[in-house]
Amino acid sequence: MRLKNKVAIVTGGASGFGEGIVKRFAKEGAHVLVADINIEGAEKVASEINKDGGNAIACRVDVSDSQQTKEMIDRSCEAFGKLDILIQNAAIGMRPTPLVETSEEEFDTLFNVNVKSVYLGAVHSVPIFRKQKSAGVIINTVSTAAIRPRPGLTAYNATKGSLVTMTKGLSLELAPDNIRVNGLCPVAGDTAMLDGFLGDGPKDESYTRFVSTVPLGRLCKPRDMANAALYLASEEADFITGVMLEVDGGRCV
């Protein structure tokens, strides 16, 4: 088991990529906290893990809220005694809208959930990692949108572009503490967020057009992200920090 007795928090863990990561980590021996604003979904995932012989608890969190983020991290430490891995996966998308037609309210919400949350996760987890004086891992879910943006999603693209710089900068700041910080850049997946990205046109046509931009001919699956996250969280990647790992079937080539 590659994560035996490690403790991991996964935000956005109730569905999609987050659920895939949570379940893979549990199979690899990690104790996991499934964090999501959808507590019913988080509890369902945790229950499935526990029935399968794993060890998981659920926690409701609004990742854009500082106090709730702190309480999430504190709960993990209280339940499992420590924190080894923080996967900052929670995010929201948007429907295709030109930047100048994007409302200020939506713009602010996107940055609060997609960017501020990653800052807050670092603010509240890094003191724990430093106090433990053991290697820590932070993995941020970024996106191919940060590297090869699509038109009509500029506000969303900008949030993910911000995470590239934040992840790289934080990796340099935390390297002396042996805390590794990396990013995962998936192409869109068959998750709940995809419907919004496809817009209001015929779904089959939009989906086919979307997939046609990926050289390997399909979208990202939860298992693809789970495999990539597992590698970056494991000791096999103990000399890797500040990297944006593209999980995209060649989309960004």
Image (cartoon, rainbow, N blue to C red):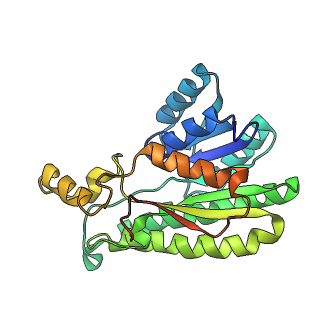
Position in image of residue 202 (x %, y %): 11, 53
Position in image of residue 36 (x %, y %): 52, 43
Answer with the quarter of the image where residue 130 lies: bottom right
Q: How many marks?
A: 0
Q: Residue furthest bottom?
A: 100
The answer to whether residue 86 is left or right of residue 214 is: right
Answer with the quarter of the image where residue 21 lies: top right
Residue 39 shows in the view: yes
> Looking at the figure, which quarter contains the C terminus?
bottom left
The answer to whether residue 176 is left or right of residue 253 is: right
Q: Residue furthest front?
A: 216
Query: Closer to the camera, 42 or 188?
Result: 188
Query: Closer to the camera, 157 or 209?
Result: 209
Position in image of residue 240 (x %, y %): 68, 64
Could you tell me which residue is drawn at 61 percent across and 58 percent down?
Answer: 139
Query: Closer to the camera, 6 or 158?
Result: 6
The answer to whether residue 223 is left or right of residue 107 is: right
> Looking at the figure, which quarter contains the N terminus?
top right
Position in image of residue 84 (x %, y %): 74, 49
Could you tell me which residue is drawn at 63 percent across and 55 percent down?
Answer: 232
Residue 104 shows in the view: no
Residue 245 lies, with reference to residue 146, above or below; the image says above
